[in-house]
Amino acid sequence: MTARGWFLFSLMGVVWGIPYLMIKVAVDAVSPSTVVFTRCALGAALLLPFALRQGGLTRTARAHWRPLLAFACIEIIAPWWTLTDAERHLSSSTAGLLIAGVPIVGVALARFFGDTERLGVRRVTGLALGLAGVGVLTVPHLTGGDARSLAEVLVTVVGYATAPLIAARHLKDVPSLQLTALCLTLAALVYAPAAALTRPAAVPSAEVLAALAGLGVVCTAVAFVAFLELIREAGPTRATVITYVNPAVAVAAGALFLDEPLTAGILAAFALILAGSVLATAAAPGRRPRREPDAPDPDGGDRAEAARTPAP
């Protein structure tokens, strides 16, 4: 991978590792609906003009409105609210580590929806390790009134793992920029009434406003653009490896900026989930991986691969 590729990879590792920190800061002062609306509205405002310049946005929306609606609901509208609401009670590091289980759930869902590839001992071991890591992380919270928060994160994980299946089967012909802009716009419209009803009585602090701006501008709009460039530079398979880097950033950010505890349990859970994700998503033994093109087009056939890495 080139120096530019490594720069983009490092950038994405941070950009999609810090949303959990920003969500935690913002949701302590404003409602989850306001957080999601602000994030989606800012992202849509920045990306929609570029999507319009591509042309054919209205035609795309009309031709693919059913899968677009399903993708928006499962990838953004439901998961972003449940994740944000869960962080009212869970630490940002815990949320980030639980989201790391997305690749594991993705493997299980792919099997359920007809993936005929043999799992093998390696991938089964990975699933078991990942589930053990989730157990280590969640059991201490079950007695503290956080069962609902854990269930909300589970909804988020299932959504992030399911949405790529929709993109791969029904949205392969939709340019990634148009797909993202349309979904963010729809999500912003959905949450606008709730955000208006639950708006804070006073202007939030500068810290909260900065967190909201960071979520919308950096972690949504800029992140999607940078990720598309990373796919161009390194290919879709290497690009999705950031899924394994983001949780480490989430844990470190929570410990550094929010004084969240970095316990032995968290470290053990991180090791188990990371190892499980790597093993569960590895190619089956004896199966030759598909050769990556030198310069994949993020607006072409590789956009389904791009969708496999969730935006937190």
Image (cartoon, rainbow, N blue to C red):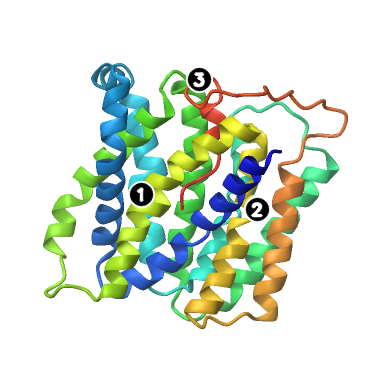
Residue on which disc 1 sits: 78
Q: Which x, y percent locates residue 23?
A: 38, 65
Q: Earlier in the sequence, mark 3 or mark 1?
A: 1
Q: Earlier in the sequence, mark 3 or mark 2?
A: 2
Looking at the image, do the residues carrying marks 3 and 1 touch, with CB atoms under 8 Å apart?
no
Above or below residue 192? Residue 33 is: below
- How far apart, in angstroms, are the residues tagged by discs 3 and 1? 27 Å
Residue on which disc 2 sits: 244
Residue under the image location 57 percent in, 34 percent down? 231
Above or below residue 187? Residue 114 is: above
Q: Amino acid at mark 2?
A: Tyr
Res. 142 visible in picture: no
Q: Which x, y percent locates residue 33?
A: 25, 59
Above or below residue 141? Residue 119 is: above
Mark 3 or 2: the one toward you: 3
Mark 2 or 1: the one toward you: 2
